[in-house]
Amino acid sequence: MQAQAAALDLVAKFGAKANLNTDLSKAPIKLQLEGNVKAPADPKAFKVPKWVSFLHIENFKLFGGGAFDGQGTTSYKREGCEKHDFCSNLPINVRLDFLTNAMVQGITLRDSKQFHANVLGCKNITFEHVTVSAPKDSPNTDGIHIGRSDGVKIIDTDIKTGDDCISIGDGAKNLDITGVTCGPGHGISIGSLGKFANEEPVEGIKVSKCTLTDNSNGVRIKAWAGEFPSTASYMHFEDITVKNVSCPVLIDQKYCPWNK
């Protein structure tokens, strides 16, 4: 109860300031968010590219029906963002790093300046009934990005954004994505892979009972040509419905955006 109260107090005091961090790893944390937490609209307010960050917690739950609003509308018009060249230093709405046995349930992520949720180094984390909302022309605003994590589940989640609804990076294992509605966006993507040295394999990805509407792609695997070796194996796509999707299934081994 003390840990829960401490986490709630962090939100109460947080207001619209940047950089809410928790490192309360000694006890389970339950964070109930019922209101709207708004980020500063000006990207210059951030010294580092993150806003809300949860790290090194076992038995964590984020719930309550509230929203993290990144107020990213002005950032989408930033010079160069249409090609993603200068958007990587913008803040992510919510970072979830090195969590074990975690649940994110009933939360809305809105108008992030960059990725809406970034999952790194997690084990057994579930997203359920999460809503992601951003305009279709918002660059580099992936709904949920997953890297080097084992046992991620994304269930009955609605994602509308200007980039990948779900993007899966190196080291992702045993992912189960089911009942997701995606669109507009770029679809559900594995990769891009092979751009950097020493990437970890991607394996055991299941995507089922998902509906993708008004997307540039459906489900895809993308890898850079002539770069570093990498592998993606045990991919399973089942019961996928696509509507107004340019390329429903794509395996791209010569991924090369913006003619680089």
Image (tube, rainbow, N blue to C red):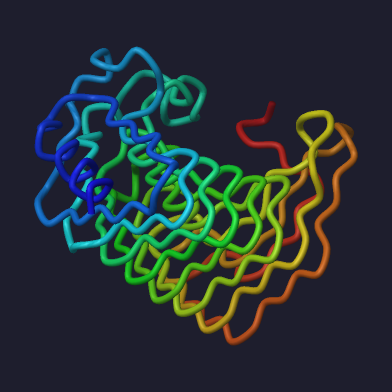
Residue at 28% from the left image edge and 49% from the top image edge: 135
Whether residue 27 is situated above or below residue 65 in the rendered picture: above
**Who is closer to the viewer here, 59 or 69?**
59
In the picture, residue 183 is in which quadrant?
A: bottom left
**Who is closer to the viewer here, 44 or 211?**
44
Q: On the picture, is 197 further left or further right than 57?
A: right
Q: From the top left corner, tell me how far across and down residue 41 is, in percent.
A: 17, 26
Residue at 51% from the left image edge and 40% from the top image edge: 97
Q: On the picture, is 69 further left or further right than 249?
A: left
Whether residue 228 is situated above or below residue 57 in the rendered picture: above
Whether residue 243 is situated above or below residue 94 in the rendered picture: below
Task: In the displayed orientation, state which residue is furthest to the bottom.
Answer: 239
Q: Quadrant of the N terminus?
A: bottom left
Q: On the picture, is 21 further left or further right than 260?
A: left
Counting labels gives: 0
Residue at 18% from the left image edge and 47% from the top image edge: 5
Whether residue 144 is situated above or below residue 181 in the rendered picture: above
Q: From the top left corner, tell me how far across and down residue 26 is, in percent.
A: 43, 43
In the picture, residue 114 is in which quadrant?
A: top left
Q: From the top left corner, tell me how far across and down residue 112 is, in percent.
A: 30, 39
Q: Quadrant of the C terminus?
A: top right
Q: From the top left corner, tell me how far across and down residue 120 is, in percent.
A: 57, 43
Q: On the picture, is 152 further left or further right than 15?
A: right
**Who is closer to the viewer here, 199 or 216?**
199
Residue at 48% from the left image edge and 25% from the top image edge: 88
